[in-house]
Image (spheres, rainbow, N blue to C red):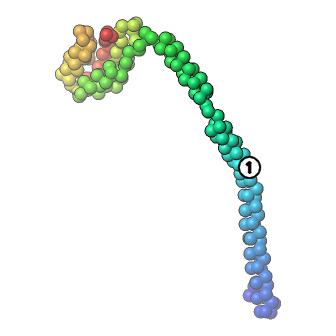
Amino acid sequence: MRHTLLPLKERVTLRREYRVRTLIVLLSAVSGAIFVGACALFPAYLHTWSMSRTALSDVAAINNDSGKDNLMNVRKALSADEALLTALGGGTEAPRFSNLIASIVAIHSPLTISSLSLSRQGAASIAVELSGVAPTRDDLLQFKNRLEALAAGQKINLPIEELARSANVPFSIQFTIDLP
């Protein structure tokens, strides 16, 4: 506004009026945003208020009701369900694979096991399939001996081609463990 033909007094008045109008526009925008936000939150407030009233009335109803009859009915239903579960679950004891896996992992010492597969074969045995890499042939033979001790009387066969290499020997072992 320096290059206007308006006198200095009118330029000062125009600047002041411009600033006042800018402030009024900004304040009206802020108040409009606050009003819209309050209107958007009002339904959530009403919902929360009604839910708290419902919850308070439920708590009052529970406090007024003795609840002994309901508690007895729940206990009877639980005991009947427990009897039914024990009747249905009797004699279906599944083998615990976690103990067998922990035993195999405990004896694998210098070897790297890349695959371990357990599957149930009939009611009295578990088929185990192991594969991995042994650092040396002697480590693989020692692992085979530890597995035979773990399998209690089972003979574990290693194919000859797996023993042909002397270092970084890949192996794949399959055997069966009888359940007690």
Work out which residue is located at the far left of the displayed protein and give it. Answer: 138
Given residues 154 and 129, the one toward you in this image is 154
Total numbered badges shown on the rendered structure: 1
Q: Does residue 30 appear to the left or right of 144 in the view shown? A: right
Where, quadrant-wise, is the C terminus in this rendering?
Answer: top left
Q: Position of residue 7 (x, y in %)?
A: 80, 93
Q: Position of residue 8 (x, y in %)?
A: 77, 92
Q: Residues within 10 Å of mark 1 (few under 14, many from 20)?
A: few
Q: Position of residue 79 (x, y in %)?
A: 52, 19
Q: Does residue 29 appear to the left or right of 101 in the view shown? A: right
Q: SS class of the residue under badge 1?
A: helix
Which residue does the numbered mark 1 point to in the structure image?
A: 46
Q: Is residue 175 above or below residue 36?
A: above
Q: Is residue 38 visible?
A: yes
Q: Which residue is depicted at the point 50% across and 15% down?
A: 83
Label 1 sits on what residue type?
Leu
Where, quadrant-wise, is the N terminus in this rendering?
Answer: bottom right
Q: Position of residue 165 (x, y in %)?
A: 22, 21
Given residues 165 and 48, the one toward you in this image is 48
Q: Which residue is depicted at the point 76% across and 79% down?
A: 20
Q: Does residue 116 appear to the left or right of 9 in the view shown? A: left
Given residues 136 and 174, the one toward you in this image is 174
Residue 116: image quadrant is top left
Q: Is residue 103 above or below residue 159?
A: below
Q: Which residue is depicted at the point 77% across and 74% down?
A: 24
